Image (tube, rainbow, N blue to C red):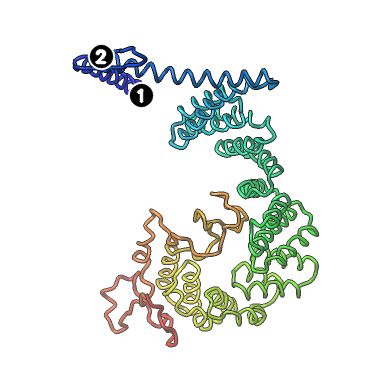
Amino acid sequence: MLWLIIKVAVFIALVGAATFGAAYLMDLEGGVRIVMAGVEINLTPIKAMIALLVLVLAIWLLLKLAGFLVAVLRFLNGDETAISRHFERNRLDKGYRALGEGVLALASGEGARAMAEAARAEKYLRKPALTDLITAQAAEMAGNKAKAEAAFKRLLTNQKTRFVGVRGLLRQKLEAGDTDTALKLAKTAFALKPRHEEVQDTLLQLQADKGDWKGARATLGAKLKYGALPRDVHRRRDAVLALSEARDVLDEGKSIEAREAAIEANRLSPDLIPAAVLAARGYMEAGKPAKAARVITKAWLMRPHPDLAAAFAAIEPDETPHARLKRFGKLLKVHPDNRETRLLEAELNLAAEDFPAARRALGDLAEVEPDARALAIMAAIERGEGAPDAVVKGWLARALGAPRGPQWCCDNCQHVHAEWRPVCEKCHSFDTLSWRAPADGAVSTPTGLEMLPLLVGPVDAPEPEIDPLEDKDDIPEAEVVETEDMAEPDPERTDAPR
């Protein structure tokens, strides 16, 4: 509507300007005098302007006629397509002009105009490979999904534009959430152009989402083959896919295949913690505890992790706490200052009821890096050393409101997972989970956890002192406490800091 108003206004302005110019010319004195071959012609200014316009039009018609006469002469000389080429040239000029206008409109974000120009270009050019592409993209820009889909389907009929049509339909199905159809289209697009990186990534993502680990490994191999992926990244992601394949086989009950796949995943990437744990389980099922211990030790050397400690403990499930502490000595010597190593040593000493050693192993983690695990261990140490209930409850109250510590977090969307997964369950990104503290590590709840220390007492609350010489007559009978029954405090214990 606005464009129509602008065109009408421009037309009225041009008519007004022409009228004003004609009136001005008519009011001018003098004119144009033409003398030729004894003939004299006098023209007023307005007549001279009209004659000039007629002359320009005559020259244009003369050039067009000359071009047509040349085409006729060529036809008479045996060129049977001369006349058709003459008119074809004019038609092509109009078509390519419309096509250029359509491309400019598409780049300018004018979807409706681009579709109109594409239709006009198709009328003159009859080349759907070009015009359908502009029509599809313009329809998408204008929000006309049905027309865009129809244009992409027309592109499928031409072998040269088949990939463009498949890719366009693939993008539409992904936006609509139809992943089943999108997976089929991605496979077709990959077969047409296996070097296309976007198609490779899309196919790999869809195969991982659907649990097609074998197909995903093949696609990953193609990315390596065509230079779209560094070798070290390929090795890591191939290990992730092999581990995922092993877990699926394990769910199906094929223990031998799962064991082999887990060992293969661990071989490809020894630092992949879930692969090391699954490989250790495979060796245990095969009756090879020494190899299981070697796998865990190698992974622990790269990075300590509680899952590795649990798998190492499962190698000898019936050993005593002291024997377990001794066997874990080889792990505790690796990265002794690592947080996970210190927490593990404290837990092992707690199990062996060596509370001073557990306190030494824990050190200042409960204050410097407090999380639920460290604070719970501190509460257990206090309980083991005979601290008052108020002290133990104070540590437990802090543990309830403390961060949970390192977890499996997605590096893309920051979503926290209860266990490792090859694909993020929220954003569906592949191989983005890492063991770290969440970005919003503190627990935020509306239950008033921050009030718990005030309700149960501070962590270093002393026992109430009762003077044995105080007159007990002023104390109700139900509240009389015999001092000889009170436990003697441990002089070696030091209360935990706040």
The amino acid marked with disc number 1 is: Trp
Within 10 Å of disc 2 (Cα), the crowding (few <14, some 14-19, many 20+) is: some
Q: Quadrant of the N terminus?
A: top left
- Image spot of residue 231 (x, y percent): 66, 63
Q: Quadrant of residue 263?
A: bottom right
Q: Earlier in the sequence, mark 1 or mark 2?
A: 1
Q: Is residue 306 above or below residue 179?
A: below
Secondary structure under tag 2 reads: loop
Q: Which mark is drawn over residue 498?
A: none
The one of 192 and 489 positioned closer to us in this rendering: 192
Q: Residue at x 71, y 74 (%)?
A: 293
**Disc 1: which residue:** 3
**Disc 2: which residue:** 44
Q: Residue at x 67, y 69 (%)?
A: 270
The one of 75 and 215 positioned closer to us in this rendering: 75
Q: Quadrant of the C terminus?
A: bottom left
The one of 214 and 126 positioned closer to us in this rendering: 126
The amino acid marked with disc number 2 is: Thr
Within 10 Å of disc 1 (Cα), the crowding (few <14, some 14-19, many 20+) is: few
Outermost residue toward the bottom in this view: 491
